[in-house]
């Protein structure tokens, strides 16, 4: 199928599909006329990419995990280092949340101090 059809079937814009291709997440074949031709499985692959992006994974991480993905959810089958990669991403998210909580507390302290000095 051509990129326009893949876009219609997945609801993903063509520029995003080309980006996924540039990141090595999609691999179309080139027709004799130079057009991208995607296999039927690309519909599932795009669904997997979108779900994994929704989980906060980067395209680099998705490239690592995509060979372990099956189905549109996607389900992740055991692959070498899969759990290590997912746990590392989770630890990074936890650290980011901790940093945001600390920043929120400092900001709240500034607001409280400013309100007290106005009163």
Image (tube, rainbow, N blue to C red):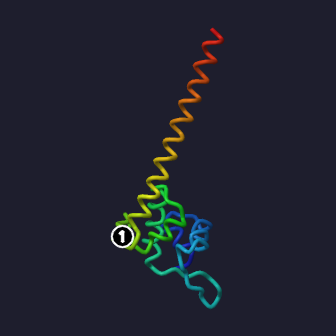
Number of callouts: 1
Residue highlighted by disc 1: 71
Q: Who's the residue at 54% across and 67% down the image?
A: 60
Q: Who's the residue at 44% across and 60% down the image?
A: 51
Compared to residue 1, the image places residue 117 above or below, namely above
Measuring from the top left, give residue 73's x and y in whole percent. 37, 63
60 vs 119, left or right, is left
- What crowding class fits label 1: few (fewer than 14 Cα within 10 Å), some (14-19), or many (20 or more)? few
Compared to residue 17, the image places residue 53 above or below, namely above
**Residue nearer the viewer, 81 or 1:** 81
Measuring from the top left, give residue 77's x and y in whole percent. 34, 71
Compared to residue 57, the image places residue 22 above or below, namely below
Instruction: Tell me the element at label 1.
Output: loop
**Residue nearer the viewer, 22 or 9:** 22
Measuring from the top left, give residue 5's x and y in whole percent. 53, 73
The quadrant in which residue 68 appears is bottom left
- Residue at the farthest top position: 119
In the rendered image, the quadrant that contains the C terminus is: top right
Measuring from the top left, give residue 40's x and y in whole percent. 44, 79
95 vs 81, left or right, is right
The quadrant in which residue 4 appears is bottom right
């Amino acid at each position: 199928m051509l990129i326009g059809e893949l876009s219609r079937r997945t609801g993903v814009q063509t520029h995003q599909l080309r980006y996924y291709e540039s990141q090595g997440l999609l691999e179309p074949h080139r027709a004799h006329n130079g057009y991208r031709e995607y296999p039927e499985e690309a519909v599932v692959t795009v669904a997997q990419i979108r779900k994994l992006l929704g989980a906060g994974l980067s395209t680099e991480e998705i490239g690592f995990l995509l060979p372990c993905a099956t189905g549109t959810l996607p389900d992740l089958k055991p692959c070498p280092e899969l759990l290590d990669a997912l746990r590392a991403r989770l630890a990074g998210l936890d650290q980011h949340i901790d940093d945001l909580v600390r920043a929120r507390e400092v900001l709240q302290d500034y607001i409280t101090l400013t309100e007290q000095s106005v009163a």
